[in-house]
Image: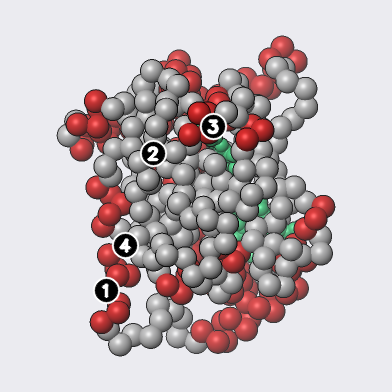
Amino acid sequence: MLVLVSLAAPGRAQPQDPEEGPAPALEPEASPSPSTSTSPSTSTSPSPSPSPSTSTSTSTSTSTSTTPTPTPSPSPTPSLLLERGRRVYQEHCAPCHGLAGDGNGSAARWLKPRPRDFTRGLYKLRSTPNGALPSDDDLLAVVNRGMPGSSMPAWEDELGVADRRAVVDYIKSFSPRFARALAPPPVALEEAPTPAVPLAEGALWYQQLGCGNCHGPRGRGNGRALATLRDDWGRHIGAADLSGRLRSGAGAQAVYRVLMTGMNGTPMPSYADGALTEHEADLAPAVRKRLVARRLWAVARYVVSLRRARGGLDWLLRDTPGRAGP
Ligand code: HEC
Ligand code: HEC
């Protein structure tokens, strides 16, 4: 079992200690994952190649100690904004996420997945590298659209844009990580290769990269490692049913982004550095980048096809009782 889980090592977000406290991980939010990809059970081992992209991205926040600027708060009137955000939060968000932002609102115990605990700054849907803080726009996008398949509602039609921005600012105040560092720039996403990579190639890489260990051979969220999966709060977490509705969005582009960024706080790793075999790690950076993009786009297309396949053949393909959703 441990062997299976270690496949997630390529890019698991790093703040895994149960109590984050004044975490030691200071600036390199996007620190390249610990190279512990030890025991791959597939022939092409996802190798933790040295990633040139993650090292530079945080340089903005490292130098501030010498300058007199007090905090990285970008807002000219932070207190007014925070006050507005607090009001919105207490009315609309606290019943689930809790007054203290710890995910323990009065409704929380009936919800699965649980409402997010904001105090650790771990967010699933981001444009930023694995392990990094989300950008304000990332948070706003989730608040706007919600997380379909969970109880997290969409707020775009419920709240005005100023209220939504204010509440985003407010939930950041629950975690000290946002005061210490700025979100790094988004990961560079490549265009989909044209012509599109054949689905069979995506199916192959789905298997080679070990997706099936967690998500199951046909993406139903029923892989062999399922029972061992825990989130960073120590709770059991389901591997998403990839043939259902995805919280990250519909379409291959959304899946490709998840594969590049991983989902912080969960066992879902990033494959930005994990989609190459060991000997491919020596190739020129541009070649590596192209290979990674081709493979991850191929897998992404394949994942999208799982949902279509389910439509007509559901009863034929049923390989486990019950739905192992998140
Ligand atoms: C009915 C309960 C409920 C309410 C009300 C609610 N949320 Fe959530 N929220 C959730 C749940 C459940 C999750 C976790 C979903 C998951 O992890 O898949 C979540 C997750 C989130 C996330 C994390 C997104 C990520 O990428 O990880 C943010 C941000 C968020 N909520 C903001 C808000 C804000 C702001 C409000 C109020 C305007 C709000 N929520 C109201 C249930 C709720
Ligand atoms: C170590 C286990 C593990 C491996 C390996 C893994 N995943 Fe995941 N993945 C998860 C978990 C757990 C979640 C759900 C997190 C949650 O519920 O929030 C997830 C979430 C996802 C999502 C987002 C689902 C949504 O609702 O938006 C996609 C897409 C995805 N995985 C695809 C893949 C693909 C493709 C691979 C292989 C390249 C892969 N995963 C490998 C555990 C894994």
Residue on which disc 3 sits: 2
Q: Is mark 2 within 8 Å of ligand 2?
A: no
Residue at 57% in and 28% down: 1
The disc, 3 or 2, on the residue closer to the chain's N-terminal end is 3
Give the residue drawn at x 74%, y 63%.
104
Ranked by sequence position, the earlier of labels 4 and 3 is: 3
Kind of residue at badge 2: Thr
Mark 2 — residue?
36
Report whether the residue tagged 3 is closer than 8 Å to ligand 2: no
Task: Kindly give the residue lying farthest to the left in the view shown.
Answer: 284
Question: Between marks 4 and 3, how big is the CA–CA gap?
Answer: 33 Å
Q: Is residue 299 left or right of residue 68?
A: right
Mark number, residue 24: none
The secondary structure type at the circle numbered 3 is helix
Task: Provide the residue designation for mark 1.
Answer: 63
**Mark in the foreground, 4 or 3:** 3
99 vs 272, left or right, is right
x, y (%) of residue 319? 70, 17
N-term-proximal mark, 1 vs 2:
2
Query: What residue type is disc 4 on?
Result: Thr
Foreground disc of the pair 4, 2: 2
The residue carrying pointer 2 sits among few (fewer than 14), some (14 to 19) or many (20 or more) residues within 10 Å by Cα, namely some
Asked if residue 72 shows in the view, the reply is: yes
